[in-house]
Image (tube, rainbow, N blue to C red):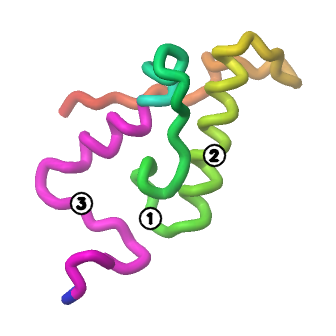
Amino acid sequence: MTDRNALGCAKLYRPGTYYDAVSLMKYNRDLSAHSGLYLAGESFSVDAGWTEPCLRTALDAVINLCDKTSASFNGGFSLAHYPHYRVGK
């Protein structure tokens, strides 16, 4: 806790920053098709830890990339089954 650059293995949100983090999670769905940039990594997740958030955001990037390029999903999956993040307080 004394190192201002390394907050440990748990995410600690400073006041007013949680919704900024959620808006980054919405980026792949809302803006990536236009920008061509898909975000992945623990920095773009609200989950604590390192490995699981990295894997989740990588899967999120791939799912949204496949959706935007008209790829077909197996098993009847569609983006309608996928979480929608809300930024409003």
Q: Residue 48: x and y, percent?
A: 44, 64
Q: How many marks?
A: 3
Q: Compared with residue 87, is residue 44 higher up or lower down, i.e. above or below?
A: below
Q: Identify residue for label 2.
A: 58
Residue that badge 3 annotates: 13
Query: Would residue 20 appear left or right of 81 to someone viewing this image?
Result: left
Whether the residues at callouts 3 and 2 have beta carbons within 8 Å, the answer is no
* Point 66% across, 25% down: residue: 65
Report the amino acid beneath label 1. Answer: Ala
Q: Is residue 41 left or right of residue 46?
A: right
Q: Disc 3 or 2, which lies upstream in sequence?
A: 3
At mark 2, the secondary structure is: helix
Residue kind at label 3, given as amino acid type: Tyr
Q: Residue furthest bottom?
A: 2
Q: Which residues are magenta?
A: 3-26
Q: Quadrant of residue 52?
A: bottom right
Query: Which of the two labelled residues, at mark 1 and mark 2, occupies the earlier sequence position?
Result: 1
For label 2, the crowd category at 10 Å Cα-Cα, with few meaning under 14, some 14 to 19 and many 20 or more, is: some
Kindly check if marks 1 and 2 are in contact, taking CB atoms under 8 A apart as contact: no
Residue 48's label in the rendered image is 1
**Residue 58 coordinates in the image, percent (x, y):** 63, 46
Identity of the residue drawn at 34% across and 40% down: 22
Q: Quadrant of the C terminus?
A: top left
Say which residue appears at 44% left-offset and 20% top-offset.
31
- CB-based contact (under 8 Å), mark 1 and mark 3: no
Residue 77 point in image, percent of width and height? 76, 22
| Location of residue 81 by image quarter | top right
Q: Quadrant of the N terminus?
A: bottom left
Nearer-the-camera pick, 14 or 65: 65
Q: How dense is the environment of label 1, judged by Cα within 10 Å: few (below 14), some, or many (20 and up)?
A: some
Asked whether residue 51 is drawn in magenta, I would say no
Frontmost of labels 1 and 2 is: 2
